[in-house]
Amino acid sequence: MTNTLDRLAPPDSENLASPGPVDTERVADLVGQLLAALGEDPGREGLSDTPARVAAWWSGFLYPEASVAPTCFTEQHLSGQLVVIGGMSVWSLCEHHLLPMNLDVAVGYVPDGEVMGLSKFGRIAQRYAGRLQVQERFTRQIADEIAVVLGNTDVAVAVRGTHLCMSTRGVRMEAARTTTVQAGGRFESDPVLSQQFLTLATDRWRAA
């Protein structure tokens, strides 16, 4: 287990850290220029405060809760139990088109003497969503960080995404959904455990 964990990329490596700081004055100026280039009057009522609002949104989006300190609890008697946390929905931005994507996240893990506070799974997902993203990388980032925090590679993450870059441009397929899965440890080697996780993780998606 130790060797596998040593190979995991640190959570904020390979250009994964949150960007910043946001130059809100410059962003507001650029938004004003964009509105003008689109044939709008940035000074008219209804648009006069739009550049500042957009700049404030970018600053907030790129800086969700910056620090996550997951709390783990010793629970030796739970070793071997499958734990699945689902229904975590976050918004991110596709880095290719700067269009929103809604990401529905499910996490599964098998405790090895420790469990993590449930709310921390959602906070980890929110932190990695708060940046320009691709769904495949987002899925792996969550799995890697949880494995490092728990000191346990028996972690799986499934994400179903709805991408506006696919539904509102190009092929314009509104019903298209993208599913990504990152599995480690026993979820890779045990097909029964993997299937149990996927069944529980996708049950909500099938009902939607």
Image (spheres, rainbow, N blue to C red):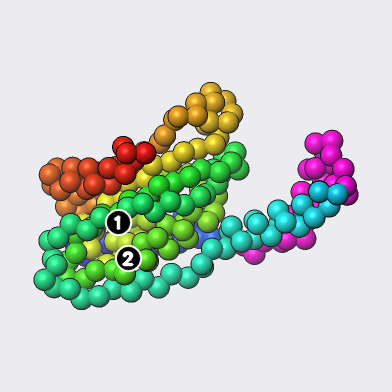
Residue 74 lies, with reference to residue 145, above or below; the image says below
* Residue 145 percent coordinates (x, y): 36, 61
| Of the pair 87 and 155, the residue shown nearer to us | 87
Q: Is residue 33 magenta?
A: yes
Disc 1 vs disc 2: Cβ atoms closer than 8 Å? yes
Pick out the residue farthest to the top. Answer: 171
From the viewer's perspective, is 104 left or right of 195? right
Characterize the local packing of mark 1: few (<14), some (14-19) or many (20 or more) Cα atoms within 10 angstroms.
some
Bounds of the magenta segment: 19-44
Give the residue pinned by disc 2.
118
Where the N terminus falls, by quadrant?
bottom left
Q: Residue at x 38, y 42 (%)?
A: 160
* Residue 118 percent coordinates (x, y): 32, 65
Q: Residue at x 14, y 67 (%)?
A: 78
**Quarter of the rendering containing residue 9:** bottom left
Element type at marker 2?
A: helix
Element type at marker 1?
A: strand
Q: Residue at x 52, y 49 (%)?
A: 92
Pick out the residue farthest to the bottom. Answer: 74
* Residue 185 percent coordinates (x, y): 20, 54
From the viewer's perspective, is 160 left or right of 96? left
Give the residue pinned by disc 1.
85
Q: Amino acid at mark 1?
A: Ile
Q: Amino acid at mark 2?
A: Leu
Q: Earlier in the sequence, mark 1 or mark 2?
A: 1
* Residue 110 percent coordinates (x, y): 19, 59
| Residue 19 visible in the snapshot | no
Where the C terminus falls, by quadrant?
top left
| Residue 206 visible in the snapshot | yes
